[in-house]
Image (cartoon, coloured by chain):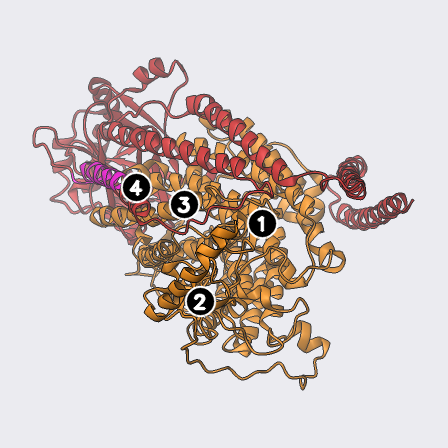
Chain colours: A red, B orange
Amino acid sequence: MSLKKLISNKTMAALAVILTAFASTTAFAQAAAAAATAKPIDMGPIYKSTLFYVLLFLLLCLFIAIVGKALRVYELTRETQGKSEGINWDTVNGVLFAVFLVVGLYGVYWEYTVHGEMLLPEAASEHGKKIDEMFNLTLVITTIVFVLTHIVLFAFAYFYKSTGKRKAYYYPHNNALERVWTIIPALVLTVLVLMGFLTWRSIFYKIEDPKNKPLSIEVTSSQFQWDVRYPGKDGVVGVKNYKKITALNALGIDFNDKNSLDDQVGEEIVLPVNKPVRFILTSKDVLHSFYMPHFRVQLNTVPGMTSYFEFTPTITTEEMKVKTNDPSFKYLLLCAKICGTNHYNMQKPVRVVTQAEYDEWVVKNATYLTDDLRKVFNLPVPVAPAVPVKADTTAKDTTAKTNQIALKK
Amino acid sequence: MSTISLQDTHHHDNHDDHGHGHHHETFLTKYVFSQDHKMIAKQFLITGIIMAVIAMGLSILFRLQLAWPDKSFPLLESFLGKWAEGGRIKPDFYLALVTIHGTIMVFFVLTAGLSGTFSNLLIPLQVGARDMASPFLNMLSYWFFFSACVIMMGSFFIQTGPASAGWTIYPPLSAIPKAIDGSAMGMTMWLISMVLFVASSLMGGINYVTTVLNMRTKGMDLWKMPLTIWAFFLTAILGILSFPVLVAGVVLLIFDRSFGTSFYLSDIVMGTQVLPNEGGSPILWQHLFWFLGHPEVYIVIMPALGISSEIISVNSRKPIFGYHAMIYSLIGITTLSFIVWGHHMFVTGMNPLLGGVFMITTLIIAVPSAVKTFNYLATLWRGNIRFTPAMLFAIGLVSFFISGGLTGIFLGNAALDINLHDTYFVVAHFHLVMGSAAIFGMLAGVYHWFPKMFGRMMNAKLGYLHFWLTFICAYLVFFPLHFLGLDGVPRRYYAFTEFEFMNKWLTVNVFVTWAAIIAALAQVAFLFNFFYSIFRGKKAPQNPWEANTLEWTTPVEHLHGNWPGEIPTVYRWPYDYSKPGAEEDFIPQTVPFSQTMSSNLPHDFEGNTEAEEIQKDWDAKNKPATEEAE
């Protein structure tokens, strides 16, 4: 049989190809192994298993080829018998589309219910709730459109498959219909645009409440870490200048600005609940993205440009642990803009606590101004006395005071 | 504007016939430095397919890493060497893989491979021209593209590895070699490759526009062109207007990298080393890049939409529904695509006012896209659908276009983008529209015009297998990825192991990787079918799909100049399928109305009163007679 011959020929050829490929890779591997004397890996079993999978795939191809030939033989015999032309592929494909529709819709339902349950918990910020509402509205609208259009698409594919007897309906245009499906999407999108626009404005155009001024926190990104600067007692984050960056002064804080003197290091980001916080975002080297998914907060950090994101956290970490039923729940800050080798691990823990806990925590933080930096900056005399007056409550600042005195002498 | 009539009133110069026999073709002029648009189309296609296979291979490599971040694959070390030491892909190389995968797929496969192939093949054939306006420029266009491919692939063979700052190569990461290894020599090669690529694309674009505007055959006015040509024409205009902006951006980046300028750089400190650059802005690059980048995604999808319009109409045996609406929506997409680029930059720290504006323009663009979708559905309605492999892929395109378009509504909304930006949701979205819909458009085109390109048929059954496996697997790969994004998993992460909340997605990653591997293996069915059929496929008849457009009036055997005799004259639009009263269910564009008196409709004459009179007389004489006969 010619069929048999063909198959055996193909197999032989395929085997020959595999063997040559195998032989050459072995040669390469030997060279590589010779070079890397440190830890030689026995590649034998690996090649064997690779070969096994390749052969498995070829076997599958062979199987498909045989099925193809069988179908061909079947069709030819039908033809010679003078019956209809064997398998009607239009019917097969039409039915497959119908099956795909049903299975696909179930798959979508499964995804929505199973993977949909694994998503972020409710937004932990004021504006985040608005974003989630906006999201849900969009999700409902798009899901309806998605399901309906797909039902129509695949149902048409099923019902209007060629039968060979029917002629298609000549229907080149209908302006009324065109108008309907221009205007309806336009209206729906207008609603979405308007709501989106209002949400967007409410996030970025904040009217400051004089009684509830935001807490300013500066975040500086660099490969691959976040440096957090709390403003200290005065509530103002001091000036910095990238040209002043040294090994000692990693952020380039300008300590000639007296607002800088009490600025504190944040080992983690701790936020008081229900108090607006204004993040001042800067970058030292490349672009990064300040992304805190639980709060629905993201903004890029750009070298040479300061950007701001203000929001109000509404749920403390402890409350969230209860809500998510996950005792290890943590808020996170991660980097969402490709920034280099360790982009995938550029994180900082975030905690939301009560105001009282915050007050207790914040005073324990070290200041950025260290003994060594004082020497470097040669702080001008009139500035120095201001510091101990302002910050005489903590142990840290007491040491700072003594340092100041030492410096003066 | 147009006069369609029983008697021909057109004036049109015949372009010089150069189908004479005085060309002495050698192997070099026929297959390598060919100036024949059909051969150049094939060159673009085969190069595009090779690049697609490479880029798909790269994607499988990083999918392996994502699915099994702790597992070692010693085999990888055998052929990747130091980039996969101990059988595990290194983080830097992972980033290089995603970068080059994106670059190849977007530019080399879906721009050059798609537009380059089908614009070259179909523009002269469907408008009725002997060749492109400038065959020489056309040849150059291919060779610039080829050089760009070679240089891009060459960057895998240098010490510091290929560019690895993401396909959008945002500076400063891409500008400072110290920031990442890939920004050394590899990035320089990326930039050179891109300049060559843009040059190629511009030469192509100018050629396409010129040919469409100047070289249409007698009777082929703009409103009789097939939608494919409209799509290629508008795509070429988009490319001509937007690609130069990318070159401008690239040149400035080359200056920043090599000559110490500060267009994109300012206030940068690497470790403790303060760089001297001042006054630039990384945001400027993003504006320049996305001014191209957004039109670029329409450069990718519009030809696919054009191809599917044609294929859906032919295989439904129905005129495309709303031909004019289809064109106006293409024009609308073209125009709007220039004023939406800012939606890629909602969270860059750009003025929030701009965010609002770009959101409005972005969501408006959904309207013409919706119109197109509904028109496809209306075309299928009461059709007589033949499921050729091309038709299957065209229907697949519609499905992906709907799914991807709808997820775009989330991302186009600035407020929602805050939490979705740069997450897997974005990855899922653009892989549905570009990675699936546009690729399906391209595959549909290959199946449909293969007989025209190679004079042979592809095997339909292998085509079905290819379609169903790819269609199902593409959804299995990209649908679940949306949910990772909604959970806040950022893209371009080398491993999900460092964050506890991402661990729950590891099983999904394994699933997605298996689906991707099956999808990749399914392409073997296509590749075998494609290359086998070139040499051994069944000989194609002249008009295998019974289509109306001009390319099917050319002989199966290619000849330089396309038509052996005079170029045919066009009398009607290309979508007269299943016209009532006609004998066949298709009437080619070359058939004058005088030969189809029984099927002419009043609106065919577009107000030509003389022709209407003639038709009325004929109807008066014949219609009652036929009724009596029955």
Q: Is residue A193 visible?
A: yes
* Residue of label 4: A185
**Label 2 – label 3 distance at C-alpha:** 47 Å
* Same-chain status of marks 2 and 3: yes
Q: Which mark is residue B258?
A: 2
Q: Earlier in the sequence, mark 2 or mark 1?
A: 2
* Residue of label 1: B390
Task: Residue at 65% x, 48% y: name it.
Answer: B82
- Helix, strand or loop for disc 3: helix
Q: Residue furthest bottom?
A: B22
Q: Which residues are magenta?
A: A187-205
Q: Earlier in the sequence, mark 3 or mark 1?
A: 3
In this rendered view, identify the residue nearer to me: B209 or B612. B612
Residue A186's spot in the image, x, y percent? Answer: 27, 43
Which mark's residue is nearer the viewer, 2 or 3? 3
Q: Chain of mark 4?
A: A
Specify few, some or many for label 4: CA neighbours under 10 Å numbering under 14, 14-19, or 20 or more: some
Task: Residue at 19% x, 38% y: name it.
Answer: A198
Q: Is residue B604 magenta?
A: no
Q: Chain of mark 3?
A: B
Q: Is residue A189 magenta?
A: yes
**Label 3 – label 1 distance at C-alpha:** 18 Å
